[in-house]
Image (tube, rainbow, N blue to C red):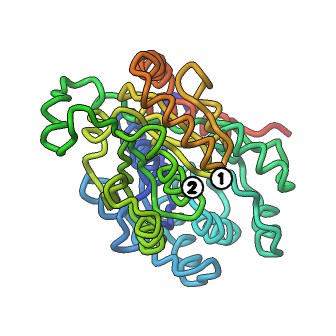
Amino acid sequence: DAPGSRSLRVLHVDSERTWRGGERQVLFLMRHQREGGDQPILAAPPRSAMLERARAEGFPVRPVPMRGTWDLGSVLQLASITRADRPDIVHWHAARAHALGAAAARLHRGPRTVLSRRVDFPVRRSPGSRLLYALPVDAIAAISEGVRRALIASGVHADPIRVIPSGIDLEPFQAPFDREGARRALGIAADEVLALLVAALAPHKSQATLLEAAARLSRSAPRVTIWIAGEGELREALLAQQRALGLQDRVRFLGFREDVVPLLRAADLFVLSSYLEGLGTSVLDAMAAGLPVVATAVGGVPEIVRHEQTGLLVPARDPDALAASIARVATDPALRASLGARGRERAQDFGSDRTAAATRSLYEELLKPRSG
């Protein structure tokens, strides 16, 4: 059978323990694969957020500790799982998954291998990283041209790299929504302009730059408040910075939130302050909600946010530029409306069904009989 006419068994390997954008992408992909008649299986650490959610949705799961990059026990376990489940494709979704999976693939060869690369960090120059990227992989799925460029600049060969943009679930943004009622329930004042950021509290998300920008907004846009949804290792440092800048009334830290869609639909604009970003699916969510975006021009972000059309782009780590663009959008309702309307239209190009279809096409390409 041609690959497109038969069900494929796909072993997804994800080593992350927390729930972030990458894990959401894996779950979207697995759902579409199952709906299309394929058979996705997940290998992930026991008690990880990814494994628990996949198990709750009825996917077959294979708990693997993945304690470190050189966890030999997990390498042997992944090789054993591959032998037992006999997947057509093994798809790695994080750095540790790549390292352990590549080692396991040396022990049990057969399935085609795919690596998803979601970050535009340069590949580390350490001997271990160089060795890892020298190991065979049939394809690397980069989520943006920005990620592809970062890989090539790091010395990774261009041939196996395919750009497959991340996607979002567009459906929740089409349901009827009582925006005024939601704003009242959240305690947002009628004349308040709410800027929202949804991101892990991690260094590359650079919420520290946003706090510096917020301190400058008290003069130029006094009715702007900023809510930051997300958890992470920088929480205490950011709270200390918030207090030092006297921003307790202007900036709120919401912690991890499951109700991101209602928050987006209640907000007035979306902010992204990252200095590294693979693509930015939180930006796509915001655009799908009809929000204008003020974002840093890093990684794959300029591939989705069109400056002066769907949002405003600013340099990374520049609190003055970030504050000026937030103030401009916050104080101009007509600009907010036009950027938001165009953004909603643009977001329709990034449905998770398109990501799944492009991924399936890549699998089919890899499974064609090799000539020679």
- Determine the CA span between mark 2 and mark 1: 6 Å
Residue at position x 22%, y 41% in the image: 188
Quadrant assignment for the C terminus: top right
Residue 220 shown left or right of residue 62 in the figure: right
Label 2 neighbourhood size at 10 Å, few (<14), some (14-19), many (20+)?
A: some
The residue that mark 2 highlights is 209
Kind of residue indicated by mark 1: Arg
Picture quadrant where residue 90 is located: bottom right
**Tag on residue 317?**
1
Q: Amino acid at mark 2?
A: Thr
Q: Position of residue 357 (x, y in %)?
A: 51, 30
Q: Position of residue 296 (x, y in %)?
A: 61, 42
Left or right, 282 with respect to 276, comes to: left
Specify few, some or many for label 1: CA neighbours under 10 Å numbering under 14, 14-19, or 20 or more: some
- Above/below status of 138 relative to 129: above
Figure check: 290 above or below 113: above
Q: Which residue is more in the foreground, 214 or 364?
A: 214
x and y percentages locating residue 324 in the rendered image: 57, 37
* Front-most of residues 299 and 37: 299
Query: In the rendering, which numbered label is found on residue 65?
Result: none
Residue contact at pointers 2 and 1, CB within 8 angstroms: yes
